[in-house]
Image: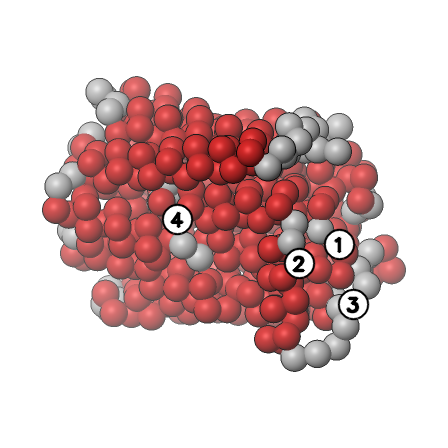
């Protein structure tokens, strides 16, 4: 049942707070991309911002997993929401005052990425403290639906706010949105949380190594995570591809850019609701879903007009979430509790940590040739990776369904 996790009061609070804060995050993402293009007009500069924002994920997200395994996460998450709000508020003041410079946007992108490198895995691990194991599939799907509903609301609202008042007010509204997430965490009942057994004490580096060895020994975790790393790095560079498609391929303004993000979000929301209502996908099936996404990405590169692109974005959004949320569910259900934080840290690393390389590649190819060429190259690489994963799993006799 897709709504099963909402029967838990603590999860309802978390769900409500995340709706607001995730919408604010997406609004800020739209504003940041548009601000960089306004200041520079450069696809390479836009790709550079994504690189700076995602490099910290490579450096720090694995350390978030052991922290999540060691400590109760609620108060830790409260501190992180406050820090994210402060960063957005300062950037808002710089932009609204007209004093912002490109190097400052790079600095705040790096700070934002660093904080998110810790916040992301911690939030993922916290879900298991809010619900019973039988409700994790529902909770993961609903979490994904929050993120993707926010993908609709945030960019659409961001496009309107940019057109009416400018990019600075998107940052200001995002700062306020984190108040909702903070308040939801404060209101939770501590006695109704279900913390996992703490990991054995030891150095963070040793715990990270133990977590990596655990994943390496679990084929049904290792292959989906490796494939997710490829697809997320090469194929899910929407923060670079969408503004370039909107501005240079289809000639739409900020509102049209917001509509493209909303179309992607509509498909993603549909996919997340499907995840919440369907049985967990095994690794072999996840490989097939990844291949389907690659075909849709190639179709987007060949889209004849704006309307066709919107339809393809809906489909691509749906299939990409079936894949990424399916991997998340596999991680939550298949991982032993004492390793969950570390494996989710690895999930967050492969899901977002490869973006610097993919964004740099996409920006460079788009700058040299065209954004459509960059999309076609991304689709080809994702399809090759999907095919290799499927061939490996078939050869190893991987089950088609989750046992």
| Residue 177 spot, x, y in % from top left | 53, 54
| Residue 285 spot, x, y in % from top left | 58, 29
| Tag 1–tag 2 contact (CB < 8 Å) | yes
Q: Residue furthest left?
A: 368
Mark earlier in primary sequence (3, 2): 3
**Which label lies toward us, 4 or 2?**
2
Please determine whether, in this image, residue 399 is positioned above or below residue 44. above
**Which label lies toward us, 4 or 1?**
1
Q: Which residue is mark 2?
A: 214
Mark earlier in primary sequence (4, 2): 2
Looking at this view, is 133 or 225 the one in front?
225
| Residue 88 spot, x, y in % from top left | 43, 63
| Tag 4–tag 2 contact (CB < 8 Å) | no
For disc 1, the neighbor class at 10 Å (few under 14, some 14 to 19, many from 20) is few
**Secondary structure beneath label 1:** loop
Q: Which residue is mark 3?
A: 198
């Amino acid at each position: 049942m897709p709504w099963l996790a909402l029967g838990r009061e603590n999860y309802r609070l978390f769900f409500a707070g995340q709706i607001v804060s995730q919408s604010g995050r997406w609004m800020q993402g739209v504003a940041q991309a548009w601000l960089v293009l306004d200041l520079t007009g450069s696809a390479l500069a836009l790709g550079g911002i994504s690189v700076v924002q995602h490099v910290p994920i490579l450096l720090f997200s694995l350390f978030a997993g052991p922290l999540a395994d060691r400590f109760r996460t609620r108060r830790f998450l409260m501190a992180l929401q406050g820090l994210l709000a402060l960063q957005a508020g300062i950037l808002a003041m710089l932009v609204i005052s007209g004093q912002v410079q490109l190097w400052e946007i790079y600095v705040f992108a790096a700070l934002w990425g660093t904080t998110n490198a810790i916040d992301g895995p911690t939030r993922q691990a916290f879900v298991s403290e809010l619900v019973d194991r039988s409700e994790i599939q529902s909770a993961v799907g609903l979490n994904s639906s929050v993120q993707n509903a926010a993908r609709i609301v945030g960019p659409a609202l961001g496009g309107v706010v940019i057109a009416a008042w400018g990019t600075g007010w998107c940052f200001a509204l995002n700062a306020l949105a984190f108040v909702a997430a903070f308040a939801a965490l404060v209101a939770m009942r501590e006695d109704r949380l279900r913390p996992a057994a703490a990991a054995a004490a030891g150095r963070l580096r040793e715990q990270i190594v133990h977590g990596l060895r655990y994943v390496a020994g679990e084929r049904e975790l290792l292959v989906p995570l490796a494939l997710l790393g490829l697809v997320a790095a090469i194929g899910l560079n929407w923060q670079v591809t969408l503004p370039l498609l909107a501005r240079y391929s289809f000639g739409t303004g900020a509102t049209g850019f917001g509509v493209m993000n909303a179309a992607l979000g509509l498909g993603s929301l549909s996919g997340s609701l499907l995840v919440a209502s369907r049985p967990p996908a095994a690794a072999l099936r996840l490989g097939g879903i990844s291949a389907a996404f690659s075909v849709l990405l190639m179709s987007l590169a060949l889209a004849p007009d704006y309307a066709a692109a919107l339809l393809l974005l809906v489909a691509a959004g749906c299939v990409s979430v079936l894949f990424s949320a399916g991997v998340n569910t596999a991680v939550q259900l298949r991982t032993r509790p004492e390793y969950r934080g570390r494996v989710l840290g690895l999930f967050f690393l492969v899901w977002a940590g490869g973006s610097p390389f993919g964004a740099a590649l996409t920006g460079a190819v788009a700058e040299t040739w065209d954004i459509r060429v960059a999309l076609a190259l991304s689709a080809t690489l994702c399809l090759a990776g999907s095919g290799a994963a499927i061939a490996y799993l078939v050869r190893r006799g991987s089950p088609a369904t989750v046992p």
